[in-house]
Amino acid sequence: MQQSETYADPNRSGAPQSGPPQSGPPQSAPRLLTGRRGEWTVFAVLAVLIWPFVAVGVVGGYGFLVWMFQLIFGPPGPPAG
């Protein structure tokens, strides 16, 4: 015999919540970079710190692919004969 049990969810009862929240004291929201100064800060971080590493990684990855291709199939140019 199967029995279904229904549990009451206190958050969905519709009754107003009274007292402090159950999870502890309220946490302050993280401060986001907004406005003109925040945009310049994000741009500077991208331009100075992140994009140079991305560029070196892309160029280095392409060079590695070319190197492996030539290692397997030989250097470009007409066959030596």
Image (cartoon, rainbow, N blue to C red):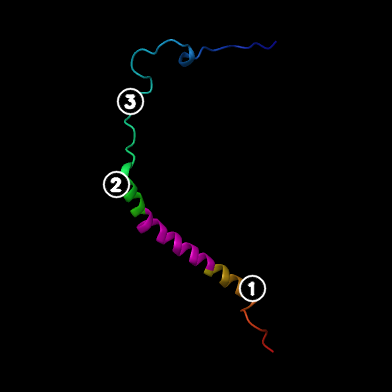
Residue 49, quarter of picture = bottom left
Q: Position of residue 31 (x, y in %)?
A: 32, 38
Q: Which quadrant holds the N terminus?
A: top right
Residue type (three-letter) at the residue carrying disc 1: Ile
Badge 3 marks a residue whose secondary structure is: loop
Q: Which residues are magenta?
A: 46-62
Which callout, 1 or 3, points at the residue further toward the start of the chain? 3
Residue at x 31%, y 31% (from the top left corner): 28
Which callout, 2 or 3, points at the residue further toward the start of the chain? 3
Residue at x 31%, y 46% (from the top left corner): 36
Q: Which residue is farthest bottom? A: 81
Residue occupied by mark 3? 26
Q: Position of residue 7 (x, y in %)?
A: 54, 12
Residue occupied by mark 2? 37
Residue occupied by mark 1? 72
Assess whether mark 3 and mark 1 are in contact (beta carbons under 8 angstroms): no
The question of residue 48 being in magenta is answered with yes
Measure how far apart labels 2 and 3 are at the Cα level: 28 Å
Mark 2 is surrounded, within 10 Å at the Cα level, by few (under 14), some (14 to 19) or many (20 or more) other residues, namely: few
